Amino acid sequence: MAIHYLKTADKELEARATADVTDTVKVMLARIKAGGEAAARDYAKRLDGWDGDIVVSEAAVAEAVRVVPQELKDDIAWAHDNIRRFAEAQLATVSEMEVELRPGLFAGQKLIPLHAAGAYVPGGRYAHIASALMTITTAKVAGVGHITACSPPKPGQGIHPAILYAMQLAGADHILALGGVQGIAAMAGGLFGAQPADILIGPGNAFVAEAKRQMFGPVGIDMFAGPTDSMVIADAGAQALRVAWDLVSQAEHGHNSPVWLVSDSEALAREVMRLVPELAAQLPQDNRHAAEAAWRDLGEVILCDTRAEMAEVANAYGPEHLHVQAQDLGWWRATLRSYGSLFLGAETTVSFGDKAAGPNHTLPTSGAARYTGGLCVHKFLKTVTWQRVSAAGLPDLARVSANISRHEGMVGHARAAEIRLEAHRPATSQKPRLAAG
């Protein structure tokens, strides 16, 4: 049988969904660049129904802290502690160094935190408390000097109180009640008192992702992220109900969030296919519509003969979240190489990683996990290099550099090396060469 699809996604639907986003974002960014804060305010009023203060005051944050239930505060603090500690452990894996490559030739690397970051925290249908923790905490641990955070405000309410609480707990220095393209543009351009961001981070809808993509170059971004996606690898020993809920929980993100099941058991696969619509129907209405559409249009079920074929499928897809519910977890961890984050065993779930486990949930989507990982402290650190040569190392270094330069035809490079060699040793009767050859 080899690799066989029991259910396939509507690929044309995926392509049509992004057809008009690029042009819309291009027009919005151009208008905000020309009109500045006035244009951003206009978009906030028209798109979010928000005509209140854009800069969130300390008093507003304090009120949010007051109204958030203590039990939720405690849980947010618990998750924040995990995220911070994991980021600190990541930071400990990189260090500055110096090496003497040859006698008298020294080189090294230095880690420089970025000056300013802009963290986008999605609002919309869900209050993404965890996204505030994941982005701002990681930047803070890396040593970023100034962090601006923004999130879409609700009409008459502003930013969700729990999001504001998470923002201030994680260490945001400046908070803007702005969503969408206008929020991204404001953080990049330093509007409303923000410091212009060196890097833009955080998930968002298609317009937010496209705005980050179009601004990339002068401004850094964490990654170009599309809709969230998730894959479950399940063998015959997996529990169909758990697998089905894991798929539904990720399809809940939105109608354009694909979920995939890869299995070597047709009986399990067909039971999961039966269960998913039933479980999605148990969700609240908006969540149900999102999950049902994602499963109907983009869900896939793939049957394989062997675990090697299952791993082959996963590595080809490069899912954002990859959850293994199969025997011999050590083999899977050693074999799988293409994912944003790996969830091992039936006891874990992507929901843990999305909210509180510690590793960052801002991850590559749309197959980008084939070549990059997710957000981490390293994203906020410039690993720069330096070099120094002493008298002992100069002669060989200058000679080799000049010789290579002349063979490349770069005479100026050669002369810059040769004059140092000439100054280092007594003058000879040889005249400097002014041309290649």
Image: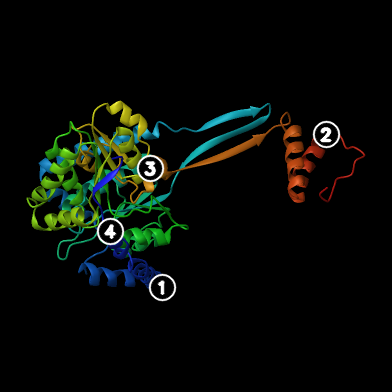
Residue of label 4: 205
Question: Label 3 sits on what residue type?
Answer: Gly
Circle 1/circle 3 CB separation < 8 Å: no
Q: Which mark is residue 34?
A: 1
Residue of label 2: 425
Q: Nearer the viewer, residue 223 or 329?
A: 329
Chain-order first, disc 1 or disc 3: 1
Q: Nearer the viewer, residue 77 or 290?
A: 290
Crowd around label 1: few <14 · some 14–19 · many ≥20 (10 Å): few
Q: Quadrant of residue 425?
A: top right
Label 2, label 1: how far apart the Cα atoms are: 59 Å
Chain-order first, disc 2 or disc 4: 4
Question: Label 2 sits on what residue type?
Answer: Arg
Q: Secondary structure at mark 1?
A: helix
Q: Secondary structure at mark 3?
A: loop
Chain-order first, disc 4 or disc 1: 1
Question: Label 4 sits on what residue type?
Answer: Asn
Q: Which mark is residue 85?
A: none
- Across and down, in percent, residue 334 comes to 36, 29
Chain-order first, disc 4 or disc 3: 4
Residue of label 3: 373
Label 1, label 3: how far apart the Cα atoms are: 35 Å
Label 2, label 4: how far apart the Cα atoms are: 64 Å
- Across and down, in percent, residue 273 comes to 15, 46
Circle 4/circle 1 CB separation < 8 Å: no
- Residue at 27% across, 26% down: 328
- Across and down, in percent, residue 210 comes to 36, 61
Mark 1 or 3: in front is: 3
- Residue at 20% across, 55% down: 294
Q: Nearer the viewer, residue 240 or 362?
A: 240
Specify whether residue 279 is in view: yes
